[in-house]
Image (cartoon, rainbow, N blue to C red):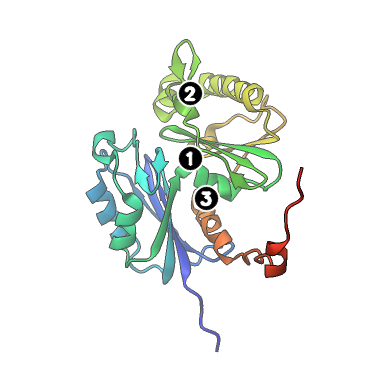
Amino acid sequence: MKKKQAGILSIDVGGSHLKADVLGEKGKSLAERIRVPTPKPCPPDLLLKMVTEMVTGLPPFDRISIGFPGVICRGKVMTAVNLGNDAWVGYPLERSLSHALGGHQAKLINDADMQGFGLIKGKGLEFVVTLGTGMGTGLFLDGELMPHMELAHHPLKKGKTYEQLLGNVAYEAAGKKKWNKRLHLALRTMNVLLSPDHIYLGGGNADYVDPDGLPENVSVGDNKAGIVGGAALWRKETKIPARAPSKKAAKKPSRKR
């Protein structure tokens, strides 16, 4: 009997909820997704404790994917505005979660980028916008993740940033109608700025998006993509490496110009 391969533990750290699931190679869930409220604030030691408790009882895994709401650099968190920023700056979350969860190899990326992997089709220039506690963005070209941009903290209107106008606090203060009007302005601006082939809207507050009047290249995706995208981080690991050039080809002299 063929031994069942261990899955990929996918962790989605959000400003409102922490989510975890074990996925197959193509992103199919192998268990029931775990979802718990995110504490306010949520320092690193508390996050590690909660995630360790969450994964108890999940199917076996041998790789870990983590989507985190902030700027990520070489496995470390550089910003975490919605979790209590000061405690997180420079924190090696990739290494720490790997150690806490059995030493399995881990990969840490921005949460909007990971959600993007679960939404995109892999053709052309695709832009992902996540709407939740804050706002996140991810840019992809032919399925490849481009350098991360913190567009959420760039001014959009009258000195206020995208996140200040479209985050959850803004939604509750402005109401659905006004919030959607701001969103439509943001989407028009993004189309002018990037000229993407498609824009995907994700995150918990994507449920409040009014589809009337949206640009033709915009669609609302499934919020589960934040977890599903974790499988994509490991797909390149199974690709066959390119064949090395033969010794004969290596010795061939270059043509002089």
| Identity, as a three-letter code, of the amino acid under mark 2 | Tyr
- For the residue labelled by badge 1, is the local secondary structure a helix, a strand or a loop? helix
Disc marking residue 97: none
Q: CA distance from mark 3 to mark 2?
A: 23 Å
Q: Which residue is mark 2?
A: 162
Task: Identify the residue under disc 3.
Answer: 224
Residue 136 image offset from top left, x and y in percent? 48, 35
Q: Helix or strand or loop: what does disc 3 sit on?
A: loop
Give the camera-side residue of 199 and 31.
199
Q: Measured along the vertical axis of the image, is residue 220 above or below residue 49?
A: above
Q: Amino acid at mark 1?
A: Gly
Mark toward the start of the polypeptide (3 vs 2): 2
Distance CA(mark 1)–CA(mark 3): 9 Å
Point out residue 249 in the picture as x, y percentages from the top left corner.
72, 64
- Residue at the (76%, 47%) spot, across then down: 256
Precedes in sequence: disc 2 or disc 1: 2
Residue shown at the point (57%, 49%) measured from the top left? 117
> For this rendering, which residue is in front, 84 or 93?
93
Q: Are marks 2 and 1 in contact (CB under 8 Å)?
A: no
**Residue 88 rendering spot, x and y as whole percentages:** 28, 40
Q: Is residue 97 rendered to the left or right of residue 148?
A: left
| Residue 30 visible to an observer of this rendering | yes
- Residue at the top extreme? 158
Along the line of sight, which residue is nearer the eye, 139 or 43? 139
Disc 3 marks a residue whose amino acid type is Lys
Of pointers 1 and 3, the one earlier in the residue sequence? 1
**What residue occupies the far bottom of the structure in this picture?**
1
Q: Identify the image quadrant of the C terminus.
A: top right
Residue 238 appears left or right of 16: right
Q: Vertically, is 51 above or below 161?
A: below
Mark 1, residue position = 204
